[in-house]
Image (cartoon, rainbow, N blue to C red):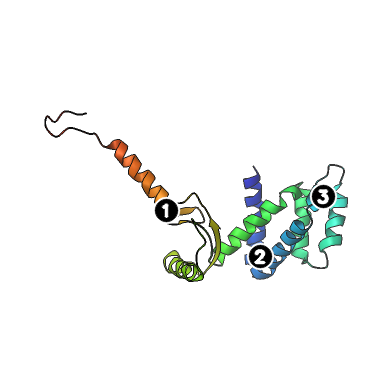
């Protein structure tokens, strides 16, 4: 259900931003709201408290954001309050962010390696991914996965390129289980 809510409201905000040719401005406001929530961990729980009326929620949002957000974004926050979806705001803004990146041809890449990559390796990997992916730029996220024996696991959106030694060994193991052994003399299976 939360996925549906984030899609419906995220698509609405994204469509408005594209229609009015304000994608960059709205995207910056989305970042501001997300950062404000991240910097104030008690903000959302207070805003979602059952004793907070819609009027109080709207007043709090106006006090915090009115000076820094456009009327369109304030209106959007008001819609979330009126529809009782303000608790879903982070998933809505995350969905918007994903759509804006896709629209702007920015790929989000997660790379897992058994040890930290050098700057040169990172540069080569990024250049190669730009060549084959069709994205204009990439947002690279690296992590060390000590469970990998070697190679890389690369995730771009919902696609996974697993070029790790572990996955190759697992594939070989699956193939070996399929092999039926026979002794060479009688042709009988062992």
Q: Secondary structure at mark 2?
A: helix
Residue 107 is marked as none
Indicate the position of residue 37 as horizontal and vertical percent values.
Answer: 76, 57
Q: Quadrant of the N terminus?
A: top right
Q: Which residue is mark 2?
A: 17
The C terminus sits in image quarter: top left
Discs 3/2, front: 3
What crowding class fits label 2: few (fewer than 14 Cα within 10 Å), some (14-19), or many (20 or more)?
Answer: some
Q: Nearer the viewer, mark 1 or mark 2?
A: 1
Residues at discs 3 and 2 in contact (Cβ within 8 Å)? no
Real-space Cα separation, disc 3 to disc 2, in angstroms: 26 Å
**Residues at discs 1 and 2 in contact (Cβ within 8 Å):** no
Residue 189: where, in percent of width, then height? 19, 29
Residue 54 % position (x, y): 84, 49
Residue tagged by mark 1? Answer: 164
Q: Residue at x 16, y 28 (%)?
A: 188
Residue shown at 87%/61% (left/top)? 63
Q: Earlier in the sequence, mark 3 or mark 2?
A: 2
Looking at the image, is mark 1 or mark 2 earlier in the sequence?
A: 2
Residue 47: numbered disc: 3
- Earlier along the polypeptide chain: callout 3 or callout 1? 3
Residue plotted at (78% across, 51% down): 44
SS under mark 3? helix
Q: Secondary structure at mark 1?
A: loop
**3D distance between C-alphas at marks 3 and 1:** 45 Å
- Residue 187's place in the image compared with 162, above or below, is above
* Nearer to the camera, 29 or 72: 29
């Amino acid at each position: 259900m939360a996925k549906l809510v984030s899609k419906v409201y995220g698509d609405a905000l994204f469509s408005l931003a594209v229609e009015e040719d304000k994608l960059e401005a709205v995207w910056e406001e989305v970042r501001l709201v997300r950062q404000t929530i991240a910097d104030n961990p008690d903000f959302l729980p207070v805003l979602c408290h059952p004793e907070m009326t819609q009027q109080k929620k709207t007043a709090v949002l106006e006090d915090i954001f009115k000076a820094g957000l456009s009327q369109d974004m304030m209106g959007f926050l008001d819609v979330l309050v009126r529809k009782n979806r303000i608790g879903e705001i982070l998933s809505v803004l995350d969905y918007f962010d994903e759509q804006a990146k896709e629209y702007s041809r920015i790929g989000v890449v997660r790379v897992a390696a058994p040890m930290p990559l050098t700057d040169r390796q990172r540069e080569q990997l990024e250049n190669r991914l730009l060549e084959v992916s069709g994205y204009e730029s990439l947002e690279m996220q690296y992590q060390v996965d000590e469970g990998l024996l070697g190679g890389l696991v690369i995730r771009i959106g919902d696609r996974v390129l697993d070029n790790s030694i572990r996955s190759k060994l697992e594939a070989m193991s699956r193939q070996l289980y399929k092999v039926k052994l026979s002794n060479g003399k009688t042709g009988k299976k062992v």
